[in-house]
Image (spheres, rainbow, N blue to C red):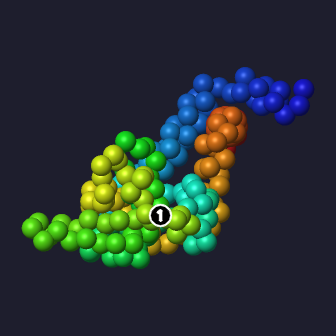
Amino acid sequence: MGWVGEQMDSIKSLQIRQVLTQGVSLGMIVTSALIIWKALMCITGSESPVVVVLSGSMEPGFKRGDILFLHMSNDPIRAGEIVVFNVDGREIPIVHRVIKVHEREDTGEVDVLTKGDNNYGDDRLLYAHGQLWLQRHHIMGRAVGFLPYVGWVTIIMTEKPIIKYILIGALGLLVITSKD
């Protein structure tokens, strides 16, 4: 019968009270993860305190699969800093370096121009139609640290969703059938 058959027999032998206890435990794990994420958002001032590098546009500094830790402060953005930004009309944030900073004399607002370290030209082709500069509201945060290659788990689960479903199912089955 194998491992799957043994797990199914284990589920059938559980009492309702055990199933409810395991379900509550699973709910507490998910809730804890959400609380940690929200706390990181408050501490870092970024709507997304952790991002995964999805392309090779920042090589050799950051490779595909690296995890970046972000922080957003009120300090002025300077050329050379690595920022993560959203562009109107695109869902996925972009990680690139600031190459130019332009301060408007009339309002004092700062506009920035970005470029991937491994790209030939600046990012104006990536920006929304007619947009030449990024404003502060486009920027999600500045890179303050990174973990190499750890983000590959996210990339693999995004590119091959079946792996994500198998992993989630196996973890759920493990939580439900654990005897503790």
Say above or below: 153 vs 117: above
Q: Which residue is mark 1?
A: 121
Q: Quadrant of the C terminus?
A: top right
Is residue 147 visible from the viewing direction of this image? Answer: no
**Quadrant assignment, res 13:** top right
The reply, left or right, for residue 156 in relation to residue 77 is right
Quadrant position of residue 52: bottom right
Q: Is residue 8 visible?
A: yes
Residue sitting at 50 percent across and 44 percent down?
A: 30
What is the secondary structure assignment of the residue under circle 1?
loop
In this view, the residue in front, 163 or 141, is 141
Q: Where does the image place residue 147, in percent across and percent down from the top left?
A: 58, 68
Dot 1 surroundings within 10 Å: few (below 14), some, or many (20 or more)?
A: few
| Residue at x-position 52% and y-position 46% | 29
Q: How many marks?
A: 1
Is residue 108 toward the left or the right of residue 154 in the image?
left
Residue lying furthest left: 106
Which picture quadrant has residue 134?
bottom left
Residue drawn at x 55%, y 30% is 20
Q: Who is closer to the viewer here, 148 or 96? A: 96
Image coordinates of residue 87 in percent, x first then y, are 37, 50
Residue type pointed to by label 1? Gly
When the figure is inspected, residue 172 is found, relative to residue 152, above or below; the finding is above
User: How far from the left and from the top, in percent, is residue 111?
Assistant: 26, 65
Image quarter where the N terminus lies is top right
Q: Pick whichever, 162 or 139, lies toward us.
A: 139
Left or right: where 21 falls relative to 112 = right
Left/right placement of residue 52 relative to residue 137 reads: right
Instruction: Find residue 93 and report its horizontal and vertical position in percent.
Output: 44, 52
